[in-house]
Amino acid sequence: MLKIRIAFVHNYCIHYRIPLFLNLLRYFDVDFYFAGVYRTVKRIPQRLKRKSYILRSVMPIVFSPMLIIHLLRKRYDVYIAGDIQTVNTWITFIIAKILRRPFILWEERWFLTKRSRYFWPFMKLIYSKADAVIVPGKKAYQFAVLCRSKKNGVFIAPNASMLTITNRVLEKALNLKQTLFKDKFVILYFGRLEELKGLKYLIKAFAELEREYNNVSLLIVGDGTLKEELKDLIIQLRVKNAHLIGHYVEEEEERALYFLISDVVVYPSIKETWGLLINEAISVGKPVITTYTTAAAHDPITDGVNGLIIPPRSIEYLKRALIEIMRNYGKISHSSKKKAMILIKKYNYISQTKGFIDAVHYLFKNKKIQHKH
């Protein structure tokens, strides 16, 4: 472990980031500052817990007053913060500049929201004055380069979220396939039930598909503000084989089970900074239908090989894509499994950690921080 003291400021301690945080502790002396612990985290590993501060925060702007005192008192060698729209990231950036210490921005963003347009001049300043920027993929990389007007100092740490498959869950999935979903083509959406996820278009497309094919089944798994509205839509359209499981799935085995019983995973988001559902789908070799406004569509998905990329907000394109997958399932299922073997080597926690290590080494190379023995 290098004796570099790093302050790492992030919105939440969330389950799919924990492996990254633990990996970073193997290489650096990191203190993590979280504005909260996400509901999917049942227990923070002891090694991470010892190096974490859960700060009382004002939401949704993510402002933790005590963060200012921690960052000023402890005088870290490097300051890292993610989500450029939050006050905590702005605080971390300003303190790093006041103390003349290097600042690394970790950011998935590749488009402006209505909210971010108000703060765009300051956000652009953070991009341009950050000593390094870490992004998850192509879309965020292009956006960061555009904001900075240079490629130097921009590093890719591929987003990672992988499902662990055990023999027990494989056996359970096989049993479900042979009983509840026998001879059914299972379509899965797994995630938050929000307007921007494009789920109304998916349900409407499925309603049309079901009129033509009697062997299809739709699983929507998750929770969110749109839950009751989606239930009403299913009833209104008289959809018979759509099942809405309206709660968060926390157990990893149960999460894996839904992916294993599915034949295709659909992520019809209207606009998405990444789309970790896609990482989980490719980790088990499932083909994916997603939109070109989902950032992950431009990295792990190869159109026509391990999935299909379509326009957002289109019932017709969704229906066509589902029919195409069904008609060519043997071919696309085989190519998805083959592609998964390659993609797993890139979209994993080792590769993600390497992106952060590369950014810190870049600071060494450019004498932003002094090597400590």
Image (cartoon, rainbow, N blue to C red):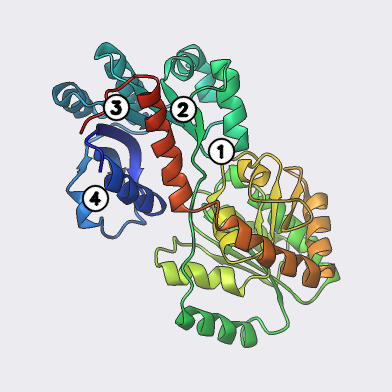
Q: In the rendered image, which residue does mark 2 sit on?
A: 133
Of the residues tagged 4 and 3, which is closer to the observer?
Answer: 3
Q: Distance from label 4 to label 1 (Cα)? A: 26 Å
- For marks 2 and 3 on the same chain, the one whose residue lies earlier in the sequence: 3
Q: Distance from label 4 to label 2 (Cα)? A: 24 Å
Q: In the rendered image, which residue does mark 4 sit on?
A: 48
Look at the picture and state if 311 lies above or below 213.
above
Q: Assess disc 1: are there few (<14), some (14-19) or many (≥20) residues with their C-alpha within 10 Å of its C-alpha.
A: some
Of the residues tagged 1 and 3, which is closer to the observer?
Answer: 3
Look at the picture and state if 181 lies above or below 122.
below
Q: Residue at x 55, y 25 (%)?
A: 144
- Of the 4 image quadrants, the one containing the C terminus is top left
Q: Closest to the observer: 280 or 77?
A: 77
Query: Does 177 sit left or right of 86 as displayed?
Result: right
Give the label on residue 85, or none: none
Residue type indicated by callout 2: Val
Q: Closest to the observer: 301 or 23?
A: 23
Q: In the rendered image, which residue does mark 1 sit on?
A: 273
**Do tag 4 and tag 1 residues touch (Cβ < 8 Å)?**
no
Q: Distance from label 1 to label 3 (Cα)? A: 26 Å
Q: Closest to the observer: 334 or 1?
A: 1
**Do tag 4 and tag 2 residues touch (Cβ < 8 Å)?**
no
**Do tag 4 and tag 3 residues touch (Cβ < 8 Å)?**
no
User: Residue 67: x, y in percent?
Assistant: 22, 28
- For marks 1 and 3 on the same chain, the one whose residue lies earlier in the sequence: 3
